[in-house]
Amino acid sequence: MVFSDEIYDQMTYEGAQFVPMATLVHDTLCATLSGLSKVYRACGYRVGWAVFSGRTHEAAEYLHALELLASLRLCSNVPAQWAVQTALGGHQSVRELVSPGGRLHESRAAILAGVQRSRFLTLSPPRGSMYAFVGVNPLVMPHFDDQQFALDLLEQKHALIAPGVSFNVPYTNHFRITNLPDPATLGEVFARIEELLTAYAAAPRRQAARDTRNVVRHVSRLK
C-alpha cells in the first residue's frame, strides 16, 4: 500500500509540474492525503482527507473498517465541511501566490537572493512547497553545527530557523527556513544570519592570534 502526502500539490514554482502518485500507482492500493492547511492556508480548521485509488476492489474490507473508524472517532464541524467544498471547487488563489509577483514567489526570490549574497551559504532552489533547505559550505566552515547555530541565531539575533538534523539527515550543515514572511523581513533575517556566520568565521582567527601572542610572550620570558 502507498500513502502519499500531497498537501503542497499546487504550490510549485518556475514551471515545475506536480505528478499525483495516484496516476502512477495501479497495482496496489494508494491513499492520497491532503488538507486545508497549506495550499488553502486554513491551518486553524484542522481539516484533512484521504482519497483511495488503485486496486480498491481488493481492499473492500480494509476501506470499510476505515470508514467505520472515521464515523466513530472523527467528526469535523459543519463550517469546516463547507470550507472543503469551497476550497476544492472555488478559485485556486494559490496559483497567483506562486506566480511572479505573488507573495510566495517573491519571498522565495528573497531567499535565493539572500543565499546568493552570502559567502557561506548554498541552496538548491526549491521548486515547490513553502520552505528552503539552506546549506552552509563545509569548505568555508568545516565544523559547522546546525543545532548550535539555530540556538545562537535565536538567542543572539532573535531569528528562528529549524536545524537540518531535525529532518533526520546524517549531516549537520543545513537549516530550514520558510518563505512565509515578506521579502523585506527575509532580507533582514539573512542579514542577521550573515552577521552570525561572519562572527563564527572570525572566532578561530581571533583564537589563533591569541595563541600566537601567548607563544611570543612565553618565548620572550624564556630569553
Image (cartoon, rainbow, N blue to C red):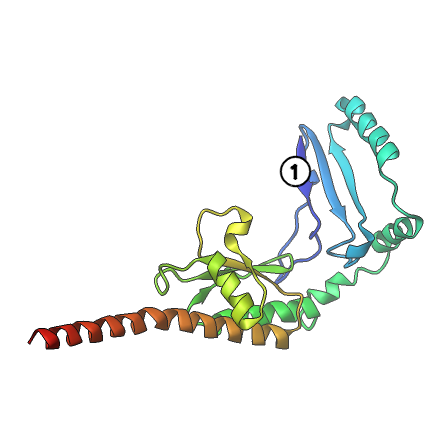
Q: x and y percent of residue 37 in the render?
A: 76, 54
Residue at the farthest left position: 223
Asked whether, in this view, residue 172 is left or right of residue 29, the answer is left
Q: x and y percent of residue 94 in the render?
A: 75, 62
222 or 33, nearer to the observer: 222
- Asked whether residue 146 is in view, the answer is yes
For residue 12, what is the image quadrant? bottom right
Q: Which residue corresponds to the image point at 41% horizontal and 73% vertical from the top-left?
A: 198
Quadrant for the N terminus in the image:
top right
Q: x and y percent of residue 214 in the render?
A: 21, 73
Asked whether, in this view, residue 68 is left or right of residue 166, the answer is right
Q: Is residue 151 above or below residue 117?
A: above
Quadrant for the C terminus in the image:
bottom left
Residue at the farthest front position: 221
Name the residue that disc number 1 marks.
24
Asked whether, in this view, residue 194 is left or right of residue 185, the answer is left
80 or 201, nearer to the observer: 201
Q: Say what secondary structure mark 1 lies in.
A: loop
Q: Which residue corresponds to the image point at 76% horizontal and 35% vertical from the top-left?
A: 52
For residue 73, what is the image quadrant? top right
Q: Which residue corresponds to the image point at 37% horizontal and 60% vertical from the top-left?
A: 138
Q: Which residue corresponds to the image point at 69% horizontal and 53% vertical from the top-left?
A: 8
